[in-house]
Image (tube, helix red, strand yellow):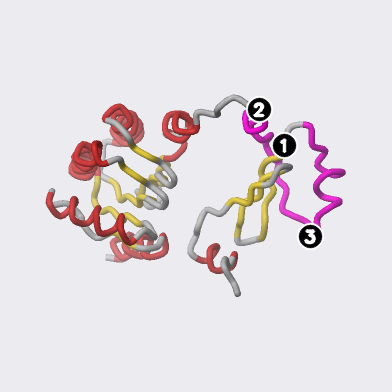
Amino acid sequence: MTTFSGVLASSHKKDVLYVTERCVFRLTQGGLSLIEVAPGIDLERDILRRLPFRPIIERPAPMDSAIFLPPPMRLRDRMLDINIDDRLSYDPVTNTVFMNYSGMRVRSEADIKTILAAVDRLLEPLGRRVNSIVNYEGFTVDDDAMQAYMDAVKYVEQKYYLKVSRFTNSGFLRLKFAKELEKRQLTSRVFETRREADRNIAREHER
């Protein structure tokens, strides 16, 4: 029985990581790319000689040493605050911003303010409206923060967007978001895959 297809995941542009105690691989259309190596590990001796294949290697970074230490890693702070600016990128050729909220958990209005500040830093200086693709795979919002988060979504869409495509493979989240978005008279369709979201934006470019 096949429980996971790398070919299918790659064709849907899923961000897939293979994390081991020695290194981390990322799935790419060209194969597995070795992107991180654990502290104290010799790349050739401890990894490459033991693999039945040759991965793509382009200056792998060291794995965070905190992973291997006893103290708590404070993952919530890392997922939201440290990486928030890295989760947002803008392509001037297509005038499209990609927001990667995959795996994030929003718990409070403080979290929402952190997200909004990053969005404003990126988009306000552009001085024009943009298309947007938003990745909500594995994204969660605590019930107490849902209304404030959706109000923030309304602010961003009304201030910055020409058109937006949101996607997540969670049927529950799609229904929940669609209901809240429709209530606020916003773009309420939430797609299941990145490919569908991309196609929706591409149709706008073809007009």
Residue 121: percent from the left, percent from the top? 34, 30
* Residue carrying label 2: 69
Vertical side of 78 occupied by 50: above or below: below
* Helix, strand or loop at mark 2: loop
* Residue carrying label 1: 38
As drawn, is 44 to the left or to the right of 77? right
Stretch in magenta: 40-68
Give the position of the C terminus as an image quadrant. bottom left
Residue 150: percent from the left, percent from the top? 22, 43
The residues bearing labels 3 and 2 have C-alpha atoms spaced at a distance of 30 Å
The residues bearing labels 1 and 2 have C-alpha atoms spaced at a distance of 12 Å
Q: Looking at the image, which residue is at 45% across and 33% down?
A: 76
Asked if marks 1 and 2 touch (Cβ < 8 Å), the reply is no
User: Which amino acid type corresponds to the residue marked 2 in the rendered image?
Assistant: Leu
Query: Residue 30: which quarter of the image?
Result: bottom right
* Residue carrying label 3: 53
